[in-house]
């Protein structure tokens, strides 16, 4: 096993990511064998629709967890972005482009708000995210008067944004998602902000003593997360159309599960964008497989919870062995 891990190609790709990708392939083969028609385009597009918004949520929270923080508000904030921008589009007649930018701006504002409280006010991330979750739900309900919002269909001239998800059966959203993941990989691993964000999770005090403004870079991590949550909202409404107030909590655990499963350490200092992408595909495939088996959503919640526990335990065990 050690010889395999020391192989140059394996070291470059990452042994854990290779194992994770093999699990993804085996899961897909299992579902294709057990479920008739699972390899068809309908199931593939359904999986990808889930990947897009969950993927941007997971990529965003990867930056926060890399600093040693956490954000449980990403799901409700995504719904808040979709509800407020969608209501502005459908009720106030705003142009579609303005509504999309509004979604990203709302996500960024929540990210800056969370980052300011954590980095400058020293409020624990858990408390901040719980408060933001409630604020997002309440704000969306007040703005939309507790009404659900349905974004325009593709046949409507204002529904052109749906081409960002797919054109015919071609998954345009997959291309956008993978390009965004590559850009974020470069940002996290090959730029000064990315290195500072990772160092914050490793040893925040040492980074501070070296003269780095740790408050600024911690806030930047939350701002990146908020921006990606706003983008996730766009892909959510591009795939599912209708958004209801008071929802979104269920996507927190799924996004964090995809992130941690992919190799991002819950104590910070270690993050893998590539692993997060694979983890998101596993969560999305699992969700589609459970629905195809005609099992309830509750089964997926149970499995997602077990995945989080296993992933965190594996991370803790690996760190103990390394120490």
Image: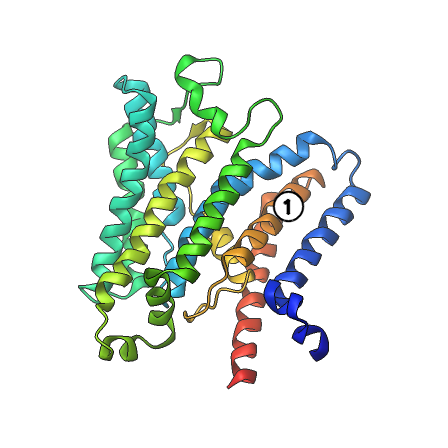
Instruction: Give the x, y percent position of residue 197.
Output: 34, 64
Report which quarter residue 142 is drawn in: top left
Please tell me how many numbered marks the rendered image carries: 1
Q: Is residue 246 visible?
A: no
Nearer the observer, 7 or 96 = 7
Report which quarter residue 234 is drawn in: top left
> Is disc 1 placed on a helix, strand or loop?
helix
- Is 259 located above or below residue 214 in the figure? above
Instruction: Give the x, y percent position of residue 309.
Output: 55, 66
Nearer the observer, 134 or 103 = 103
Residue shown at 33% from the left, 37% from the top: 81
- Which quadrant would the N terminus be assigned to in this image? bottom right
Nearer the observer, 208 or 235 = 208
Residue shown at 58% from the left, 32% from the top: 171
Report which quarter residue 88 is drawn in: top left
Left or right: where 281 falls relative to 266: right
Q: Is residue 290 visible?
A: yes
Residue shown at 60% from the left, 28% from the top: 170
Instruction: Give the x, y percent position of residue 251.
Output: 47, 47
Residue shown at 41% from the left, 59% from the top: 188
Left or right: where 131 falls relative to 225: left
Left or right: where 175 falls relative to 102: right
Q: Residue at the left extreme?
A: 121
Q: Which residue is mark 1?
A: 285
């Amino acid at each position: 096993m050690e010889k395999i891990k020391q192989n140059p190609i394996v070291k470059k790709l990452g042994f854990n990511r290779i194992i994770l990708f093999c699990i993804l392939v085996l899961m897909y083969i299992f579902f294709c064998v057990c479920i008739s028609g699972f390899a068809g385009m309908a199931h593939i597009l359904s999986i990808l629709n889930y990947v897009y918004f969950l993927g941007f949520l997971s990529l965003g929270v990867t930056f926060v967890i890399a600093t040693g923080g956490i954000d449980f508000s990403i799901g409700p904030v995504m719904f808040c972005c979709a509800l407020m921008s969608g209501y502005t589009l459908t009720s106030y007649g705003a142009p579609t482009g303005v509504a999309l930018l509004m979604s990203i701006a709302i996500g960024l504002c929540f990210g800056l708000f969370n980052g300011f409280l954590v980095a400058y006010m020293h409020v624990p991330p858990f408390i901040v995210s719980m408060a933001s979750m409630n604020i997002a739900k309440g704000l969306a309900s007040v703005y939309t008067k507790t009404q659900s919002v349905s974004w325009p269909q593709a046949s409507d001239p204002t529904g052109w944004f749906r081409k960002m998800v797919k054109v015919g059966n071609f998954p345009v959203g997959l291309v956008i998602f993978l390009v965004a993941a590559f850009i974020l990989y470069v940002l996290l691993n090959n730029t000064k902000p990315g290195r500072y964000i990772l160092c914050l999770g490793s040893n925040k005090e040492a980074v501070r003593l070296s003269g780095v403004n740790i408050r600024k870079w911690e806030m930047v991590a939350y701002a990146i997360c908020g921006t990606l949550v706003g983008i996730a909202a766009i892909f959510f409404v591009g795939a599912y159309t209708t958004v209801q107030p008071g929802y979104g909590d269920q996507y927190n655990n799924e996004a964090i599960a995809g992130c941690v499963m992919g190799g991002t350490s819950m104590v910070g200092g270690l993050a893998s964008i590539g692993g997060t992408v694979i983890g998101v595909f596993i969560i999305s495939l699992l969700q589609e497989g459970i629905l195809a088996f005609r099992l309830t959503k509750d089964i997926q919640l149970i499995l997602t919870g077990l995945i989080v526990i296993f992933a965190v335990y594996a991370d803790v065990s690996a760190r103990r062995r390394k120490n």
